[in-house]
Every structure is written in C-alpha cells, then in structure tokens.
Image: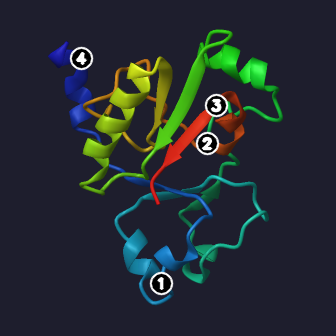
Amino acid sequence: PEEELAPLMRWPIRKAFIYRDSRKEAFPAGRTPSLFAPYSLIIVAHEKGSVTLPEALSRDSRVHFSGPITDGVPSMEKREELRRRLGIAEGEKAAIVTLGGGGDSEAPPVLDRVAKELRARGVAVFAATGPLSRTIPASITAREWFPVWPLSPWLPAFDLAVGSG
C-alpha cells in the first residue's frame, strides 16, 4: 500500500478553511487577513448572499460559496422519525450531552461522570462534540458519539439535554 500512496506525498499541501457565520467577534477587522493567510481556499458554508462576510473576505478571490455542507440534517421531522434514525428504541430514554467544542480541560471528566450516571439509570447517552472533533471522547463509545452540526434539529429526539454553562 505504501507505494500506492507515494505519488500523493509529492502533491503540494493545500489548506482549506470552512467559514460558517457564527461568531463575528472571532474575526477582528484588523487581523482577518492574517488569520486566513495560511489557507489556499476559503469555503463559505452558506448560500451566496445569505450572509455578510468580514470585509477582508468579501473581496478575497479564494472565497467560494458551497451552500450548507452538513449532510443528513433533518428538517422538521417528527420525534419518532428522529429517534428511529438514531436507533433509539421505542420506550427507551435518551439524553444528549454537549460540553462545548473542545479545549476545556474540565469537560472530559464531567462528560465521564455524566455518562456513567445516565447509563446507571438506563438512559442512552449521545455525546455531541460538534463536526470538527476527530476523536471519540475517552469515556464514550462509538455508538454514543454524536459529532453533528447543527445540533438543534435533532433535539426533539431526546428526553433530556445536558450542557455546560
């Protein structure tokens, strides 16, 4: 297999940034150009004209609008259908647990404790980590990992939500 991948190793490295309109304060006006300097491509995950980009990006040739890029996001589905899609059995209790997008050193032990308590009470655990998380939290099984964005369309499927504050 290594010889099959060798040609790929000679390709130039390209970096892409996925821009979602969420936190304007994350892009201070004077620093926006330097924040995006390392990227070859800037993909805006919205329909063109539906969001206002930071001024520096609005005239950047690397910017391309893709429309929403999250696959399988439910739209106004009934609770029963959402639960079926998630594999939650009829009559089973389920909780969504989300402790932010990462970087908080206190989140893993809290997630561990919450998951253990819920499991002990017979509640199915779904740990929402967001779509950029590439590793399953240590105390969570693959079945319990729920790395989706946006989370809100899925919320009707759950009996309980636990979040950090």
Residue at 59% across / 59% down in the picture?
20
Say what amino acid the circle numbered 4 marks.
Glu
* Residue that carries the numbered disc 2 in the rendered image: 151
Instruction: Report the disc number at residue 159.
Output: 3
Q: Are marks 3 and 4 in contact (CB under 8 Å)?
A: no
Q: Is residue 15 left or right of residue 124?
A: left
Q: Residue at x 16, y 18 (%)?
A: 2
Residues at badges 4 and 1 in contact (C-beta under 8 Å)? Answer: no
* Circle count: 4
C-alpha span from label 1 to label 2: 27 Å
Confirm or deny contact between disc 4 and disc 2 (CB under 8 A): no
In the picture, the quarter occupied by the N terminus is top left
Mark closer to the chain start, 3 or 1: 1
Q: Secondary structure at mark 3?
A: loop
Does residue 134 appear to the left or right of 91 in the view shown? Answer: left
Mark 2 or 3: the one toward you: 3
Residue at (43, 28) in percent of width and height = 118
**In the displayed image of the protein, which residue is found farthest to the bottom?**
30
Residue 149 drawn above or below residue 27? above
In the displayed structure image, the side of residue 76 where residue 144 appears, left or right: left
Find disc 1 in the rendering and name its residue. Answer: 28
Q: Which image quarter: residue 111?
A: top left
Q: Which residue is mark 4?
A: 4
Residue 149, percent across and down? 58, 43
